[in-house]
Amino acid sequence: MFEYLSARSTARRLLSLQFTYTDEGGRAYSRKDFLADLKNLSAAPASDRKVAMYGLVAAVTGDRRPVQGNPSFFLDIWVKQKGAWRALAMQNVVLAEATPPAASAARGEETKSGECKNPCQTLPYRVRSLAEQEVLNSFLAIEKASIAQDAQEWSKHVAEEFELYRSGYPPISKAARIATIERQKEAGSPVTVGELQAVRLAVYGDAAAMIATEMVPDNSRPPYRAARVWVRRNGQWLMAISVQTDIQTP
């Protein structure tokens, strides 16, 4: 991992008790597992590192180019707990340099736009505070707008700097995502969203982190792990970044 995580004692001090690490193959490690296998999980030095500050949450992004294997993009989420910055989550994803071929609109013929039981009607998560409910309301608004192919409504809940990083795709900006929604609507393509299998939500002041495992009901893509960061601006929660790593089968 980072140079400053090379020593296990240092890692223990810098990792939150809720820390999780997701590698580029979608394998998730708890804090205990990560520390136990720290040497083998060490990655190539990071490049193009950028830090986006959202109050008590920091989103650190960049690239890693190992000697062997594919280069990967990473999102490290840091939170300020009891006056100290600690890593809450680290996630890697292998992107593509060019836009892949569009998926066939005929795939998933039994799935119709507008159908959304999970997460629209039920969630595998017990809300613990009003702030958490507000973040989840923003998330549900985004998912419902995607299904309804309502680009204008979708954009209301997403920050201007938003980027989506997904396995096998190049980075997708807010403008590019809006264009995709509009093309789907024009083509009449059915739209599905990932069902939440597990969710972990943490709110720190005017920022929040959401770590989830999701699967698409029509199997149009592999199950995946998602790490998202929210920021509250002018009283509204906006998604600032989403990283989605496909879970590779052994």
Image: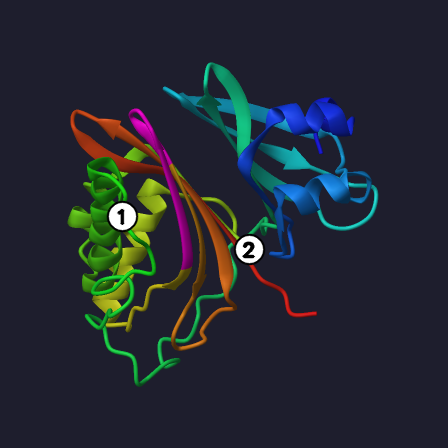
* Residue 45 disc label: none
| Classed neighbour count for the residue bearing mark 1: other residues with Cα under 10 Å, few (<14), some (14–19), many (≥20) | few
Between the C-alphas of marks 1 and 2, the distance is: 29 Å
Q: Position of residue 93 (x, y in %)?
A: 59, 48
Q: Position of residue 116 (x, y in %)?
A: 24, 69
Q: Position of residue 84 (x, y in %)?
A: 51, 16
What residue is disc 1 on? 127
User: Residues in magenta?
Assistant: 198-208
Q: Residue 9 falls in which quadrant of the image?
A: top right
At 67% from the left and 29% from the top, the residue drawn is: 12
At 40% from the left and 53% from the top, the residue drawn is: 199
Q: Nearer the viewer, residue 121 or 96?
A: 121
Q: Check disc 1 and report its element: helix, strand or loop.
A: loop
Q: Amino acid at mark 1?
A: Val
Q: Is residue 181 left or right of residue 7?
A: left
* Residue 167 disc label: 2
Q: Nearer the viewer, residue 45 or 249?
A: 249
Q: Nearer the viewer, residue 196 or 181?
A: 196
Q: Residue 17 falls in which quadrant of the image?
A: top right
Q: Is residue 74 left or right of residue 35?
A: left
Q: Nearer the viewer, residue 20 or 145?
A: 20
Q: Check disc 2 and report its element: helix, strand or loop.
A: loop
At 66% from the left and 43% from the top, the residue drawn is: 32
The quadrant of the image that shows the C terminus is: bottom right
| Classed neighbour count for the residue bearing mark 2: other residues with Cα under 10 Å, few (<14), some (14–19), many (≥20) | many
Which SS does the magenta portion mostly show?
Answer: strand
Q: Is residue 212 magenta?
A: no
